[in-house]
Image (cartoon, grey):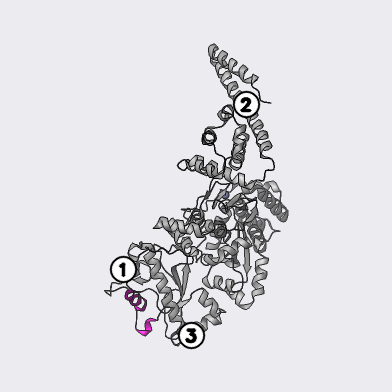
């Protein structure tokens, strides 16, 4: 049935529609193009073909169907891509029965039910009018509470330590599954696990596809009787679904806005994100209380290379934020800091004045400027001791820059501001060790940057061009004879020979011939390339075009062959193999006679 569903989805969904919900596509000929989301590039080399319902990047080589695209851009497995696209296409995955559920989908079901349970609790105003009041007083609207699916976990003062667990058991889940989902805790004192979250405001944590995978929970000590010794915010522990080093809170709603604005605001708390979105700063996410990890940075990198972090000036030097910034710089992000008044967070500022936050964002400073001003404000730049202190605090930051023009800029700036020579700054800089910023950070597991394809030489380019022209206008094959075919590198030769043998003459015969290469990955890649080329280019006079290309190709191939003989000749002369030498000379002579026009 999966095959059937895949087929149905492919029939109903247009790849252009799906991809344009992620990227801004522009039309070019019969195809569309964009800047590739899978590698860094300035010009657009990512193409989508509505005709063949596939995408292809000529920069990094990524290509495939709508399924491949969604898997790659969302960083998910096939089954999950299938679910997302089935939903979009309105295709029912009918035999997806609960007993087939993997542990993962079972836990997702538990968390979804728990979210609904908490939402209902919060809306029962008799029970938690105070919580609602608290949220409204912090500046949230009812609509926002609904959008972010905030909830409330029943307080144990009501005598019930298992309100959620009992509810879930009633829905057919086992207690140990609820523990696995992170929602209940085993206890030595009691034979039965009890609810982890009690008497707290619940913030569901979503994955990139808006599925709830965890919770953060704020204590409600503002309600009389809700005593709670625990931390202000209690998070679900790492589970099969939730890994705090992998999650950016709010990314499911922020991702497209980040791409559109081409920068991402990183804050620390749930409230920061929710209030930012409510106020229209929808490109905001939060790394929940940890330093940004490589994994999280790679998630952001899919959408932008520009990071704005909200920064409390006091914690600048020491904090997790600073470690995250270090790593972001190392991964070539352009980092800016949004400065906030002492002791305030974005949520405070926004709930007082949206404009103040807008202003703070627009005045964000690039990170080195921030460290520069910070050092000069802390120490006396006129005394020798102060100069040394400034250099000590600033030079390690300059050392981190990966771009040598930037390094040179800052060396000069520091030397001028301290009235010392640039050479002395460079000397001190050289003495500093390179710092590794990888501590406490896992390497990204599923997001290696694709390799940039090697540049093609002229012969390869001409081969592609000739094949592209042939795909569009098969009768151009008549311009090539066997001697020409022998000049092509092996895969092109195989394809062109097949076209000739099958006497392809139109799109149907071409497609039939192309189908015979389904098992050959390398040839398939070549054909994909050439199909795109043929679709992208409007050629007025294909016959003239192919003749020009073939002439160029013959010359290049001829020169290439001559060069190969030259190398062989050199070798024969070095080893003193006279017989061999004569053979090669003969071959060169006959080749010279065949010099193409
Ligand atoms: Zn690419």
- Disc 3 vs disc 1: Cβ atoms closer than 8 Å? no
Residue 182 quadrant: bottom left
Nearest the viewer among 451 and 555 is 555
Question: In which quadrant will I find the C terminus?
Answer: top right
Under circle 2, the secondary element is helix
Which residue is pictured at 67% across the width and 63% down the height? Answer: 377
Q: Position of residue 261 (x, y in %)?
A: 63, 62
Sequence-earlier tag: 3 or 2: 3
Nearest the viewer among 559 and 134 is 559
Number of numbered discs: 3
- Residue 267 in view of the camera: no
- Gap in angstroms between the C-alphas marked 3 and 2: 85 Å
Query: In the rendered image, which residue does mark 1 sit on?
Result: 176
Instruction: Give the label, 3 or 2, closer to the camera.
Output: 2
- Label 3 Cα crowd, 10 Å radius (few <14 / some 14-19 / many 20+): some
Residue ranking furthest to the top: 578
Under circle 3, the secondary element is helix
For residue 450: magenta?
A: no
- Gap in angstroms between the C-alphas marked 2 and 1: 73 Å
Q: Is residue 173 left or right of residue 582?
A: left
On screen, residue 512 above or below 375: above
Which residue is pictured at 39% across the width and 64% down the height? Answer: 94
Query: In the rendered image, which residue does mark 3 sit on?
Result: 130
Nearest the viewer among 6 and 437 is 6
Instruction: Give the label, 3 or 1, closer to the camera.
Output: 1
Instruction: Give the label, 2 or 1, closer to the camera.
Output: 2
The boundaries of the magenta stretch are 153-175
Query: In the rendered image, which residue does mark 2 sit on?
Result: 558
Under circle 1, the secondary element is helix
Question: In which quadrant will I find the N terminus?
Answer: bottom left
On screen, residue 290 above or below 436: below
């Amino acid at each position: 049935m999966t095959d059937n569903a895949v087929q149905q989805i492919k029939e109903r969904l247009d790849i252009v529609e799906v991809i344009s919900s992620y990227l801004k596509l522009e039309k070019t000929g019969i195809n569309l193009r964009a800047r590739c989301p899978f590698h860094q590039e300035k010009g657009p080399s990512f193409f989508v073909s509505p005709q063949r319902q596939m995408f292809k990047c000529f920069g990094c080589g990524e290509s495939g169907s709508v399924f491949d695209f969604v898997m790659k851009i969302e960083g998910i497995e096939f089954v999950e891509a299938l679910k997302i696209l089935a939903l979009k296409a309105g295709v029912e995955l009918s035999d997806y029965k609960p007993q087939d559920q993997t542990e993962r989908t079972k836990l997702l079901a538990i968390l979804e039910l728990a979210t609904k349970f908490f939402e209902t609790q919060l809306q029962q105003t008799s029970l938690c009018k105070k919580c609602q009041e608290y949220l409204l007083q912090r500046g949230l609207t009812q609509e926002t509470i609904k959008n972010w699916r905030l909830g409330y976990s029943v307080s144990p003062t009501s005598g019930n330590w298992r309100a959620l667990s009992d509810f879930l058991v009633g829905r057919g889940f086992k207690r140990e599954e609820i523990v696995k989902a992170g929602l209940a805790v085993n206890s030595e004192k009691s034979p039965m696990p009890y609810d982890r979250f009690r008497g707290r405001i619940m913030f569901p944590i979503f994955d990139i596809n808006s599925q709830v995978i965890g919770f953060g929970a704020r204590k409600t000590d503002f309600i009389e009787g809700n005593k709670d010794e625990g931390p202000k915010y209690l998070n679900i522990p790492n589970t099969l679904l939730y890994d705090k080093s992998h999650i950016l809170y709010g990314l499911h709603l922020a991702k497209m806005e980040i791409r559109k604005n081409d920068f991402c605001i990183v804050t620390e708390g749930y409230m920061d994100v929710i209030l930012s979105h409510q106020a229209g700063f929808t490109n905001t996410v939060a790394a929940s209380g940890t330093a940004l990890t490589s994994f999280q940075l790679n998630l952001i990198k899919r959408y932008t290379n520009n990071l704005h972090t909200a920064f409390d000036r006091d914690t600048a030097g020491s904090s997790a934020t600073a470690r995250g910034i270090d790593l972001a710089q190392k991964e070539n992000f352009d980092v800016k800091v949004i400065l906030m008044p002492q002791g305030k967070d974005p949520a405070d500022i926004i709930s007082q004045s949206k404009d103040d936050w807008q202003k703070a964002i627009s005045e964000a400073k690039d990170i080195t400027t921030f460290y520069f001003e910070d050092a000069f404000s802390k120490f006396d730049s006129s005394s020798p001791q102060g100069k040394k202190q400034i250099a000590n605090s600033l030079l390690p930051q300059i050392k981190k820059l990966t771009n040598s023009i930037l390094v040179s800029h800052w060396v000069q700036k520091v030397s001028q501001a301290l009235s010392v020579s640039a050479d002395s700054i460079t000397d001190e800089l050289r003495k500093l060790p390179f710092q590794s910023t990888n501590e406490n950070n896992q390497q990204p597991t599923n997001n290696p940057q694709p390799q940039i394809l090697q540049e093609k030489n002229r012969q390869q380019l001409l081969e592609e061009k000739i094949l592209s022209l042939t795909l569009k206008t098969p009768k151009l094959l008549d311009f090539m004879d066997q001697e020409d075919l022998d000049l092509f590198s092996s895969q092109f030769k195989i394809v062109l020979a097949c076209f000739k043998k099958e006497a392809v003459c139109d799109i149907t015969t071409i497609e039939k011939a192309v189908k015979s290469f389904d098992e050959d990955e390398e040839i398939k890649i070549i054909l994909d390339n050439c199909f795109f080329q043929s679709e992208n280019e409007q050629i007025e006079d294909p016959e003239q075009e192919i003749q020009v290309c073939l002439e160029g190709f013959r010359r290049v191939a001829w020169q290439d062959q001559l060069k190969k003989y030259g190398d062989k000749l050199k070798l024969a002369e070095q080893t003193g193999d006279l017989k061999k030498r004569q053979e090669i000379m003969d071959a060169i002579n006959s080749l010279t006679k065949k010099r193409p026009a």
